[in-house]
Amino acid sequence: MGMMNQDQAIGVGLLGCGVVGGGVAELLLRNRDAYAHRVGKPVVLKAIAVRDPSRDRGLPPELFVSDPAAVIDDPEIALIVEVMGGVSPARELIMRALELGKSVVTANKEVLAKHGREIFEAAQKGGGAVYFEAAVAGGIPLIMPLQRGLAANSLASVQGIINGTTNYILTRMAKEGSTFDDALADAQKLGYAEADPTSDVEGHDAAYKLSLLASLLFGEHVDTEAVPREGISGIMPQDLTYARELGYVVKLLGIAKRAGEGLEARVHPTMIPVDHPLARIDGVTNAVTVHGDAVGEVTFSGPGAGRGPTASAVVGDLLNVASLLDTPDRMMACLQSRTVSPMPLDEVDSAFYLRLQAKDVPGVLGAVGTCFGTHRVSVRSFVQHPAEGGHAELVIVTHRVREASFRAAVREIAEMPGIRAISNVIHVEEQA
Amino acid sequence: MGMMNQDQAIGVGLLGCGVVGGGVAELLLRNRDAYAHRVGKPVVLKAIAVRDPSRDRGLPPELFVSDPAAVIDDPEIALIVEVMGGVSPARELIMRALELGKSVVTANKEVLAKHGREIFEAAQKGGGAVYFEAAVAGGIPLIMPLQRGLAANSLASVQGIINGTTNYILTRMAKEGSTFDDALADAQKLGYAEADPTSDVEGHDAAYKLSLLASLLFGEHVDTEAVPREGISGIMPQDLTYARELGYVVKLLGIAKRAGEGLEARVHPTMIPVDHPLARIDGVTNAVTVHGDAVGEVTFSGPGAGRGPTASAVVGDLLNVASLLDTPDRMMACLQSRTVSPMPLDEVDSAFYLRLQAKDVPGVLGAVGTCFGTHRVSVRSFVQHPAEGGHAELVIVTHRVREASFRAAVREIAEMPGIRAISNVIHVEEQA
């Protein structure tokens, strides 16, 4: 190992110092010696750009500056860590660093999901690298295992629980029979959900992360705006009860897979069997199951958010970039030659769960069966529950069918005279 | 990307062509173009050393040669893949390659567990690298995530199901109430267990893999001969039934952790609570849970053996070494400055499950309680089951206690007049 020369030190500039940035700075300062030993030269935090450098953050005040561009341009800083979040000015700052040939570590899923193609291209041109382990599934090492560890494989599919807030809410609803609103209120009290929970509960956050995973899988930039997306606010406690009775659980999944010539990438509540590798992932934990042609099925699980886990991923990237600095890192390059849109849901094949309210069960059953037959929807299971006023609640699970056909059948069923209401439709995935 | 020049090609030599070697050769030949694209230059299988080169293996016959040393010495071959298994001649061949400055990819857990220290030292001296993703947990990317992905962390512990054969047997016993012998016979019929199953069922295979994980965790070579090891042949169906009634399952775990000044590394059947991340890992699947100070708890699961998964790991390593050739790969260096012995079981703190047969329950209870008190063993739960002839079977789970104290108490209890037999003792781990 020999002596460590401070001249060889690798300078790091941090853009942003919120929860994650504070965690990153703390690790870099506390573990400086251990990291120098791991990388072979010191990795030195040189500057932190924040809006108000005078605020006390429990870190050495001389590190703080107000101008992120000056941090990027500092010739003593080779690595930029972007943990500001959001699209602007993160995008412009990342591009500026890459154009100067510097490498960037970011936890920013939104900017990569929206502008990944130009960002990875700028890295390629400038000769730097972009690492983003923290942007998907928080602390779980996932991007590098996909890119490097499973490099021998053609990856066929990814399924993931990639939003902890919604998984916490669905877990509470399933275990305690709570309503969505009550479980959300608890999640907010515990700090697992924001005051405005839209990005989490409506699936935007998961869609950003899924775009990144799908882009890795397909080697093309997956347009995040074109990812079909459905949140969990329409899931009712009785859906979870019926799911359990049928041997399923409901999770908000991000799914990406090759389907013939097309590419599927979608985020929606999904019923999966209890023996599916993601079925037992409860609370705020994230998990991703990957299928490769050689390896088969592999699952990664752990904390998907939080200061420590996210900082672990950011600093892990930082040490890896630092140890490979000046090495063209082709295996992690993520170059995306074009932007692709995933298949619209209508073209996807899926099984479905349908819950509906019927007035006149014997009559309805025949009519529903005939309608399904016309649209080539095949029923896998059917359960009838008595409801108030002599009515009945019907729960139907189908075999796999083109989504457009199923939706057309449901529209016709909704108009039948014996039907009071279509209560819910949930996608079903039998396989990991 | 540009044109790929065959002059830049990276030559690969394969030592051994059994199940794994055949899978490696097949991937390299079938995916040649995809791999060249990933690495940036062609990765070309040049030669395969086997005992009988004339045998038809469904691969191009001109690749086969009989002299492994000639493959290693070939100046056109930069990377050596060792998939022969066993200690000799694998050890000598690996050392020869490393002394020539070549890099080695191996799936050979035994040679690394026994001679890792000199092997990693030879790599350091020669300037090559040793990658061994396939040696632990088969197809699951685990070594690189630990070394690189979690590099920001100080790793506190690893717990793993790292032998598929024993996990299959324990799963069958738990789900069907089968005896060990019947479940083993089924595992042999299905090809999950060898004709001589000793290495798997007595924990030798798991102990090799655990030594490797523990060496990574501690940064020292863990003497595999000194790893306390107990197999699963003593587990009875009733132990699994009682475990389930108490909210536990029994798995053969490899455990490595820091304990004060000491290092624990041990392999034994372990009762874990049903909500432990390894509790639902069934059949031949492997899984490893890691604790890091920043990330918290992360779990990796997938296929632990088999042609495709193991070849996936070997070829993944190969592509990574190839892409980083001529880069000193310090993060993966695994240099072990000394050999350490883990703590003997007597010094370990653990909780325990104890099953015993009593003649005279009221008298026994008081005596057992007094004896436990003398040895500072605290009882967490106690269940009495009626047995034939007016006797009783007692099941006791303790709190954590120094193992020597617990064993001393059990030796005394075994001598008590009201006790017919001590039927079983199993370690209990409450936490992942």
Image (cartoon, coloured by chain):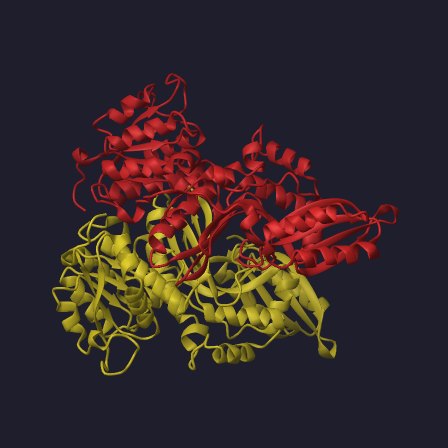
Chain colours: A yellow, B red
Residue at the image position 43 percent from the left and 47 percent from the top: B214
Q: Nearer the viewer, residue B264 or A192?
A: B264
Q: How many marks?
A: 0
Asked whether, in this view, residue A235 is left or right of residue A311, the answer is right
What is the x, y in percent for residue A157?
A: 42, 52
B106 over A206 or under it: above or below:
above
What is the x, y in percent for residue A173?
A: 58, 72
Asked whether, in this view, residue A57 is left or right of residue B261, the answer is left
A24 over B377 or under it: above or below:
below
Q: Is residue B114 visible?
A: yes
B413 over A199 or under it: above or below:
above
Residue at the image position 31 percent from the left and 30 percent from the top: B95
Q: Nearer the viewer, residue A316 or A404?
A: A316
Q: Nearer the viewer, residue A276 or A106?
A: A106
Residue at the image position 43 percent from the left and 70 percent from the top: A203
Asked whether, in this view, residue B181 is left or right of residue A191, the answer is right
Q: Is residue A288 visible?
A: no
Residue at the image position 55 percent from the left and 39 percent from the top: B203
Q: Nearer the viewer, residue B141 or B293?
A: B293
Q: Residue furthest front?
A: B374
What is the x, y in percent for residue B200?
A: 55, 36
What is the x, y in percent for residue A34?
A: 30, 57
